[in-house]
């Protein structure tokens, strides 16, 4: 007599909240955010605030309030036709063109940075630019970057972060009218690094911004994209993937503000957690403003839990200030492996470990596939595979 | 020459209402080259039998045995069963996001053979099989079953059958949801594999339609978790005309 192996207890919680036109407005309220470049304009951080309460603030006090080294954070920018890259003063007109800091650590970085790296794309032929940052010493530092796509320009900018860092920074992104810009921020820092990155974008009329956050390495990595769909027909595709190992804190707070009519946003973040103390936070705030009629938005976050002792927070918020929208919805799910997927693969002869690898890789690759940059995809697949090699079969 | 032998198989599942016995003493022997059709009412346990053979964790074998050429299948893990030569074409094939068909098939083939297939002949085989089942080559780069129509999923199962070359295959309602042309294409696929590899087939179906293309050597009537009657192809015709009433009278259903 024998029995088949026991199934994993399913721990999936799924929430689906489609909101059609005229359906009741849900969840928590998120108003337009206060923004400033001055540290003191923001009240001291207690760690109880909505935007800080899931962050280990005591471990990053120096970045929130301390003195930061504001000299240029080492970066090498690849050259491409129609692309300029230069260090400019904070008085350069491009600085502040996408907005201002939305919290205290970002404001600290803003007021500390002495130079900004300004990368400007003007080519209507798609170009690819890499901003290579291989890190610095462990002293707390500030950085400021402005990425600008001129009207109708097309291109991809990858901010490639490796090595060691203790960094608070602002990344401004401007997608000019009719432009098609992809910005990818890859965090593959070493195990001790701490990185707070406020990335805020202004998307003008009929422009399309694809913003991607890939967080794999670092002790504490908090990347907060804030996208303002400012021009009619602006389109924001916000993608993210993260893989937290034991002891890692990976946080992403996404804010999408539909300001203009007929704007579109799609937010898709996927994460995997493995090992004791692996911690992820995803907060997705979508605000559809009074004038943003006919907008279409959808945000989702999915987390795959690979071991015990992990914690994934996943908090979608949607606020709609107009009665006239084309669609708005959100979904959030955190769960273990899908046993049916594993069964299907294994029934074709693939052993359990390989089947799990395929499922996790596939789960995360769904996001990678949407980026639409083949060389980068290969590189990210390799990076995720390295993460997976460390995953023990449970 | 392979033989799959199922003896007095009793299988139950855990439900919210407690343990439920589904299979109540199934006996079946399938040899290479033979085609056995199983027909029976909804809920009679046909898919349960199929999944139990494949080793799905949801089902508990309470007693009885399944052997493949004398080896104890019930002692094997899911993937070991596949590597031993068993294959299940599922009634509801599973979608696997982010895993392309070509990656999936190559990984499966490598797992089954213990080594990666020679690239050139593999690509040729893959193309050939997809073409034969009228699946556009673009499917190779799509994610497994994701967004496939019902019929496309079924054809994809038969592509796998052809490429993975099992010795015994269970086809669980592979004909359901196929249009007339697809039914013919899928049937031809199964017949081609039978001819080329001497596959033994356990074909679960509700319709005699597919049995006109894939001629069964034996027909088993499955009722209430066991085989109620066995016969040749003529039995299928009779079931189509008369239904299952005669088997159900007096027996407990569901
Ligand atoms: N997870 C489950 N929970 C409760 N009951 C189940 C579960 N899985 C199977 N069953 C029950 O077991 C019985 C047999 O199901 P099975 O899927 O094997 O039937 P089937 O003969 O394949 O039916 P069909 O012709 O509709 O495909 C059914 O009564 C079904 O409801
Ligand atoms: Mg069934």
Image: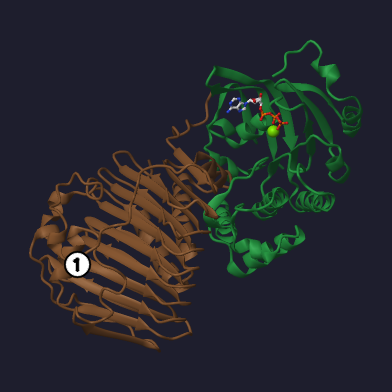
Q: Is A295 in front, or is A384?
A: A295
Q: Is residue A268 left or right of residue B24?
A: left
Quadrant assignment for the C terminus of chain B: top right
> In terms of image quarters, where does ligand 1 lie?
top right
Counting other residues with Cα less than 10 Å from the Cα at mark 1, is it few (<14), some (14-19), or many (20 or more)? many
The image shows residue A320 at horizontal and vertical percentages of 44, 50
Seen from the viewer's position, the closer of residues B121 and A126 is A126
Q: How is the image coloured?
A: by chain
SS type, badge 1: loop
Q: Colour of chain A?
A: brown
Residue in view at x 65 percent, y 36 percent: B69
> Can you name the residue that lies furthest to the top here?
B250
Quick check: A243 left or right of A52? right
Q: How far from the left and from the top, in percent, is residue B87?
A: 65, 43
Please give the name of the residue rendered at 58% of the width and 62% of the height, measured from the top-left corner: B117
Q: Quadrant of the N terminus of chain B?
A: top right
What residue does disc 1 label? A37
Q: Is residue A357 above or below residue A106?
A: above
Q: Quadrant of residue A173?
A: bottom left
- The answer, for residue B70, to whether it is visible in the render is no
Q: Residue A73: percent from the left, percent from the top? A: 18, 75
Q: Is residue B106 visible?
A: yes
The chain letter under disc 1 is A
Chain B visual colour: green
Question: Which residue occupies 15% across, 51% down?
Answer: A45
């Amino acid at each position: 007599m024998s029995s088949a192996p026991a199934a994993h207890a399913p721990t999936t919680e799924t929430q689906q909240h489609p909101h059609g036109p005229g359906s009741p407005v849900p969840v928590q309220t998120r108003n337009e955010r206060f923004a400033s470049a001055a540290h003191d304009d923001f009240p001291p951080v207690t760690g109880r605030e909505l935007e800080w309460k899931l962050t280990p603030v005591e471990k990053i006090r120096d970045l929130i309030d301390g003195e930061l080294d504001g000299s240029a954070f080492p970066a090498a920018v690849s050259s491409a036709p129609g692309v300029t890259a230069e260090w400019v003063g904070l008085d350069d007109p491009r600085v502040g063109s996408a907005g201002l800091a939305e919290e205290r650590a970002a404001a600290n970085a803003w007021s500390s940075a002495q130079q900004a790296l300004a990368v400007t794309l003007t080519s209507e032929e798609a170009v690819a630019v890499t901003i290579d940052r291989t890190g610095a010493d462990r002293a707390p530092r500030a950085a400021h970057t402005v990425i600008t796509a001129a009207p109708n320009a097309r291109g991809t900018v990858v901010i490639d972060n490796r090595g060691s860092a203790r960094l608070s920074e602002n990344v401004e992104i401007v997608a000019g009218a009719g432009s098609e810009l992809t910005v990818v921020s890859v965090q593959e820092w070493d195990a001790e690094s701490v990185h707070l990155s406020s990335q805020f974008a202004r998307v003008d009329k009929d422009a399309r911004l694809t913003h991607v956050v890939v967080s794999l390495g670092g002790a504490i990595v908090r990347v907060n994209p804030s996208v303002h769909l400012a021009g009619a027909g602006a389109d924001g595709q916000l993608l993210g993937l993260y893989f937290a190992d034991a002891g890692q804190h990976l946080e992403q707070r996404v804010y999408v503000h539909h300001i203009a009519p007929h704007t579109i946003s799609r937010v898709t973040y996927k994460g995997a957690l493995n090992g004791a103390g692996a911690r992820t936070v995803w907060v997705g705030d979508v605000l559809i403003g009074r004038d943003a009629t006919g907008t279409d938005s959808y945000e989702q976050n999915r987390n795959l839990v690979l071991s015990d002792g992990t914690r994934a927070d996943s908090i979608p918020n949607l606020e709609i200030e107009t009665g006239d929208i084309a669609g708005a919805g959100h979904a959030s799910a955190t769960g273990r492996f899908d046993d049916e997927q594993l069964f299907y693969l294994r029934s074709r002869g693939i052993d359990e470990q390989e089947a799990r690898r395929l499922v996790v890789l596939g789960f995360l690759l769904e996001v990678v596939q949407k980026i639409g940059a083949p060389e980068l995809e290969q590189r990210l697949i390799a990076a995720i595979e390295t993460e997976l090699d460390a995953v023990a079969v449970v | 020459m392979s033989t799959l032998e199922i003896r007095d198989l009793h299988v139950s599942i855990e439900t919210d209402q407690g343990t439920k016995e589904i299979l109540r003493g199934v006996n079946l022997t399938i040899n290479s080259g033979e085609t056995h059709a199983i027909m029976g009412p909804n809920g009679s346990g046909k898919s349960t039998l199929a999944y139990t053979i494949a080793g799905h964790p949801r089902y508990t074998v309470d007693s009885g045995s399944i052997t493949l050429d004398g080896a104890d299948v019930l002692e094997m893990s899911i993937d070991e069963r596949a590597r031993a030569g068993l294959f299940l074409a599922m009634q509801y094939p599973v979608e696997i996001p982010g895993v392309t068909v070509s990656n999936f098939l190559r990984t499966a083939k490598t797992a089954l053979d213990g080594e990666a297939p020679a690239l050139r002949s593999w690509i040729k085989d893959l193309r050939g099989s997809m073409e034969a089942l009228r699946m556009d080559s673009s499917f190779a780069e799509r994610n497994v079953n994701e967004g496939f129509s019902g019929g496309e999923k079924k054809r994809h199962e038969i592509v796998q059958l052809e490429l993975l070359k099992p010795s015994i295959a269970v086809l669980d309602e592979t004909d359901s949801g196929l249009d007339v042309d697809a039914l013919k294409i899928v049937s031809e696929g199964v017949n081609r594999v039978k001819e080329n590899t001497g596959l033994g087939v356990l074909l679960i179906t509700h319709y005699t339609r597919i049995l006109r293309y894939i001629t069964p050597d034996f027909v088993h009537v499955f009722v209430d978790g066991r085989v109620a009657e066995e016969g040749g192809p003529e039995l299928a015709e009779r079931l189509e005309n008369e239904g299952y009433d005669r088997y159900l009278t007096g027996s407990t259903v569901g």
